[in-house]
Image (cartoon, rainbow, N blue to C red):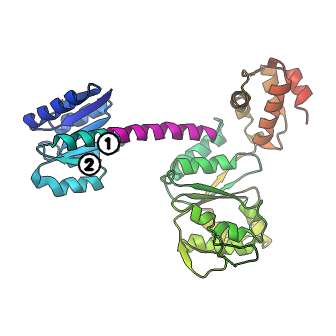
Amino acid sequence: MSKILVIEDEAAIRRVLVKILSEENEAYHVEEAEDGLLGIEKIKNEDFDLILCDIKMPKMDGVEVLEAVKKIKPEIPIVMISGHGDLDTAVNTMRLGAFDYISKPPDLNRLLNTVRNALDRKELVVENKILKKKVSKKYEMIGDSDAISQIKDIIDKVAPTDARVLITGPNGTGKELVAHWLHEKSERAKGNMIEVNCAAIPSELIESELFGHVKGAFTSAAKDRAGKFEAANGGTIFLDEIGDMSLSAQAKVLRALQESRIQRVGSDRDIKVDVRVIAATNKNLKKEIEEGRFREDLYHRLAVILVKVPALNERRDDIPLLITHFSEKISEEQGTAKKNFSDKAIKLLQEYDWTGNIRELRNVIERLIILGGSEVSEKDVKAFASK
């Protein structure tokens, strides 16, 4: 059932709106408020799928109601009700986030179409939120150690900004998870997150991969091709293993950061891009700078915020949680019942030297689930998780 709130100080108009909506669809539950203050009180204490709100009211006008609702429950669509003298204000409320407006006296067809469209939109917003939560679980950061709690706190503070972030840490520690969380918790989450593994692309192709190329720029350039920066326009580009990027490509990335412009290989035409850059590396970039393999000016552009992801050996307290997480995930993927790990098995795994970090732990858990007993024991760990 859709729950609708009508906020209108004119009793006659309010009764008409309630009557029309109630008779139109039995699935509409309609409530009333005679002024903005009462309306806000109801909105705070109840869940509504749609609000119809008059513009001119005593105590608190419709624009103030709109602004308040956008702060406390921004997902609720609001349709403004305007008198003939309020049309300019009604149009302005659309810029403030109103879904639409209807004029007094309300035209029946226009009213009902607007209500249906607004409710459909609310349903889509809810579905998108559910879908986003499912997507986020893929990149969930498991652990409550001090190191992980600190990283989560930094993400919450930095994600809503466009600040560039440099993520450091050994291979297999989950640097890409930090990057995904930064993107998903940002205002750019509606845009693309484009990942580039700088170590996996030959140095002679990295510039074309990042910035694109024009036809004939080199032997195999048979047609124009957009690069990763253009694909990430309006979103985020994640430059993984940036310490392996060639110096010539570093110079072009530096220009893109300084000027928000790129040039395709073989072209002298500037292309404007709006991209947030997140980079990651397992290398000591300060040492790379000293040895002439990384640009110091690029480092300072990238390292506005530094996030150091610890090795698994530095966060052993998180291993029991990670074992449970991977056991559930692997069992789900394989369509088998989840296996429990004995206390002694978990303790032994906590004592291992995890040189391959979380990536290695996941592989070992998968091996133990396949080869171990109905409950993974200390004996199983000694037999199948040996280094």
Residue 373 vertical placement versus 333 (above, below): above
Decide if residue 335 is on the left or right side of residue 263: right
Decide if residue 232 is on the left or right side of residue 62: right
Query: Which mark, residue 100?
Result: 2
Query: Is there any visible trace of residue 89 in the rendered image?
Result: yes
Check disc 1 and report the residue beneath it: 117
Give the quadrant of the C terminus. top right
* Image location (x, y in percent) of residue 18: 17, 31
Decide if residue 183 is on the left or right side of residue 142: left
**Residue 121 painted magenta:** yes
Q: Main secondary structure of the magenta part?
A: helix
Given contact means CB atoms under 8 Å apart, are the residues at marks 1 and 2 in contact? yes
> Which residue is found at the position 72% from the left and 46% from the top?
310
* Image location (x, y in percent) of residue 134: 56, 37
* Image location (x, y in percent) of residue 162: 51, 59
**Residue 174 painted magenta:** no
